[in-house]
Amino acid sequence: MWSRPNRPIRIERAGFKFHAVLVVNSAHQAALAGPDNERWLPIFWALDNFKSAQATNLKESGWRMKPADESKVPTAANARAAFTTAMDNWDVAVSALARTATAGELFDLFARYGSRDFRDIGHKIIYVCNAFRTLDVIGWHHAEPVLRSLAFALLKYDGKNPAKEDLEPDRPGRKNAERIRNVVPPRKRADKPDPAVTKELVKALRSATAEDMGEAVAKLTAAGDASARFAWDGLFLGAGELLMRQPGIVGLHTLTTLNALHYAARTTGDASLRAFLTLQAASFLPMFRDRMKTGKMADVKIDELHTREEDKEFKVRDVYAELSRNKETAARTALSVLKADPKKAKELIDEGRRLIFLKGTDAHDYKFSTSVMEDAAFVSPEWRSHFLAASVYWLKGSETPDAPLVNRTRAALA
């Protein structure tokens, strides 16, 4: 029997062992979409992962979040102003707001602060979205401790207080806030949407600065919703290309971060915030690219990914068998399958998810796979095959050994 968790994990960074919390929504979403006879595997994995992280926390420090100091909690009338003033100054005051604001009001505030800076390679906005999605499932009577924890995570920084400094992780957010200030993007279709925009953005992302990308996407999204969709296509593909160039911890976060920013953009009812989130997505990708330059990056381009040349009918099982041997060949195999029959996308996703259930060993396996499998539905059909083909770079091959927890769980339930 699993014991009830009674100590929150210390948020020294919005990541590391705290991934046990970040991944809960991803595991839940994966279980809902998984096959009936295996959807319990992500649940047991998430429980085991959380208890392991909790044990590590107890061993290292035993820290737990203190109760709110009721004498310092502002009145309901002052709750929002107290929260925004504190967050703007990189301080925290959230209890009163958690008790009085609606879920929608809270989401918009936390999404704005969760996306304002590039510290922790996207974990802040990931935590915002996963926390709110989890509260939608478990109930909002749990909101106050979750939101206090979330506010602490969003305030993480090293060194000098960002409110008093001009620091690199904050510059794109400040510039993008200026771009959208007093300008509400029109809620209409563009007169002449141009799908070539997608390819142009992918090309630009290979060398453009965060400032360049923010400016370029600001001009596009001002044309209306259709242009915004083509911009998101370009950003999703650009993130997929970065993963192809360097499959690793930074590369995979290009896609999990973009997933969170896109979820926030399509969830908020605030047009100004939606524009800000879109511009931040554009500006973050060059910052990811620059972070990756410390390692080796392959010279591959997602829009130049080709199908396999063999005169053969490839099947989904061939994709995952090849993935155990060669990521690039597996991606080309996936593209061959999807170009021959775009309806195979569901089968490719379902099998990829099933293999994560069986072979996933890390929070990133669940976070990544849940993100790309959700986002594939939002990528335009003409680019969806390329996006899914790129995603196999961080999925599991069919020849990968099953995770030890799978065998332990099956034995326990036998």
Image (cartoon, rainbow, N blue to C red):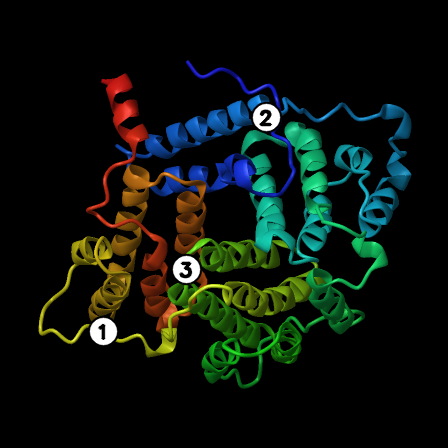
Q: Quadrant of the N terminus?
A: top left
Q: Name the residue nearer the viewer: 68 or 11.
A: 11
Q: Which comes sooner in the sequence, label 1 or label 3?
A: 1
Q: Quadrant of the C terminus?
A: top left
Q: Name the residue nearer the viewer: 183 or 239.
A: 239
Q: Which mark is residue 249?
A: none
Q: Which amino acid, mark 1? A: Thr
**Residue denoted by label 3:** 377
- Marks 2/3 in contact by CB < 8 Å: the verdict is no
**Residue denoted by label 1:** 307
Looking at the image, residue 171 sits to the left or right of residue 330; the answer is: right
**Residue denoted by label 2:** 60
Q: Quadrant of residue 402?
A: top left
Q: Which comes sooner in the sequence, label 1 or label 2?
A: 2
Q: CA distance from mark 2 to mark 3?
A: 42 Å
Image point 81% across, 51% down: which residue?
Answer: 161
Q: Which amino acid, mark 3? A: Ala
Q: CA distance from mark 1 to mark 2?
A: 50 Å
Asked if residue 26 is positioned above or below residue 142 in the image, the reply reads below
Image point 47% across, 80% down: which residue?
Answer: 203
Image point 57% across, 84% down: which residue?
Answer: 191
Dot 1 surroundings within 10 Å: few (below 14), some, or many (20 or more)?
some
Secondary element under disc 3, as helix, strand or loop, is helix
Residue 149 in picture, x, y percent from top left: 68, 35
| Of marks 1 and 3, the one in the foreground | 1
